[in-house]
Amino acid sequence: MKGNTIVDKDKKALYWYMALFWICTLTALFSVDVTVWLMEVLPAYIGFLVIFILLDRGVRFSPLLNVIFSIQIVVLTIGGVFTYSKVPFFNPTDCMGMTFDWERNNYDKLGHFMQGITPYLATKELLIKRKFVKRGAMQVFLCISVSMAVSAMYELFEYGTTLVSSDFATDFVASQGDPFDTQKDMLFAFIGAIFAACFSVNYRYAEEKSAPI
């Protein structure tokens, strides 16, 4: 009976991510620029590939990680549909922009905040399940380091696009004329990682009997 419950949970996770995959793909039909959309959601597709491979191997993610993965995919997809500099509600003339007196669209900061949270929690779950590092300062340090490494690689990827096409990079990078956009993006990723560290400090993962990550 317990074995059937585990299988049912695995199937539910697979079906959920398959549904997200197709929803994400269909949003290309409503995107402002298909090329920019593809570049923005590319990390989501890389994530889908990794998730499907791990699920096929019998890996089961914690409920917390499933929620975070889903939120990350939604954030990336919205950014792809509208481009990060034009997402509604985050413009200076929209409700949030006027409330907080923004001079630019700050949706990308939400994206980079999530960019700190997701790698942190994924790394933490990996370290715990494989018993690489016990809970403590070293585990927190490694998880934050991975989050910052992911953020740095993404910023280098953005820089690469500016070398290929400056016109295309305007919508993709969405710096909106801010000379310190890269530093601020990494700062928000760092804040996201710190938030994840504080939020998940007492989170307990269930014992896994499926294939290890």
Image: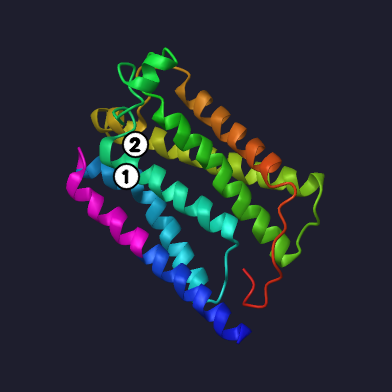
Residue 55 falls within the magenta-colored stretch: no
For the rendered model, the colour scheme is rainbow
Which mark identifies residue 161?
Answer: 2
Label 2, label 1: how far apart the Cα atoms are? 10 Å
Image quadrant where residue 160 sits: top left
Are the residues tagged 2 and 1 within 8 Å (C-beta)?
yes
From which residue to which does the magenta span run?
A: 19-33
Q: Position of residue 114 (x, y in %)?
A: 51, 40
How crowded is the residue under tag 2: few (<14 C-alpha within 10 Å), some, or many (20+)? Answer: some
Amino acid at dot 1: Met
Q: Is residue 54 left or right of residue 211?
A: left
Q: Is residue 166 left or right of residue 119?
A: left
What residue appears at the point 34 percent right and 46 percent down from the top-left corner? 77
- N-terminal of the two: label 2 or label 1? 1
Q: Position of residue 121 (x, y in %)?
A: 62, 50
Residue 24 falls within the magenta-colored stretch: yes
SS at badge 1: helix
The residue lying toward the viewer, choosing from 186 and 80, is 80
What residue appears at the point 40 percent right and 42 percent down from the top-left corner? 75
Q: Check the image and report above or below for 158 versus 127.
A: above
What residue appears at the point 57 percent right and 56 percent down from the top-left corner? 65
Q: Check the image and report above or below for 105 versus 41.
A: above
Amino acid at dot 2: Thr
Q: Is residue 192 left or right of residue 157?
A: right
